Image: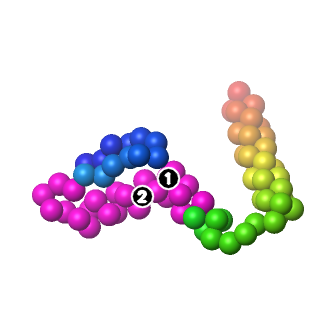
Amino acid sequence: MSERGGAGSTIQVVDNQVEKALKVLKKQMQRDGLFSEMKRRASYEKPSEKRKRKQARARKRERKARARTALRSHDE
């Protein structure tokens, strides 16, 4: 039904099932982060806002990593 790839990925419509192909396309775009990218680029983002967003994302990643390691050490 679909070929997963980079920016040039394609979705094939099989047996005229356009709705199903559209659903697959939306799911793939969501997974690739294109919707959030489009929302972010819709308006200008000040450098300070960009920095804050990146720092918040880094904090979230760090928190998730700490939770994973705590879970692993707790299991052992």
Tell me the magenta residue range. 13-37
Spot occupied by residue 5 in the image (x, y as percentages of width and height): 42, 41
Left or right: where does residue 24 sit relative to residue 6? left
Q: Is residue 56 visible to the viewer in this orientation of the structure?
A: no
Which quadrant is home to the C terminus? top right
Whole-Å distance between the Cαs marked 2 and 1? 6 Å
Q: How is the image coloured?
A: rainbow
Residue at 63% across, 71% down: 42
Q: Which of 55 and 7 is in front in this view?
A: 7
Spot occupied by residue 32 in the image (x, y as percentages of width and height): 51, 51
- Report the magenta stretch's main SS: helix
Write down the residue under mark 2. Answer: 27
Marks 2 and 1 in Cβ contact (< 8 Å): yes
Write down the residue under mark 1. Answer: 31
Left or right: where does residue 38 sit relative to residue 22? right
Residue 13 lies in quadrant: bottom left
Q: Considering only vertical position in the picture, is 45 above or below 13?
A: below
Residue at 38% across, 42% down: 4
Disc 1 marks which amino acid? Arg
Which residue is outermost to the bottom? 43
Which residue is outermost to the top? 76
Disc 1 is placed on an element classified as helix
Residue 16 lies in quadrant: bottom left
| Magenta segment includes 14 | yes
Spot occupied by residue 52 in the image (x, y as percentages of width and height): 84, 59
Disc 2 is placed on an element classified as helix
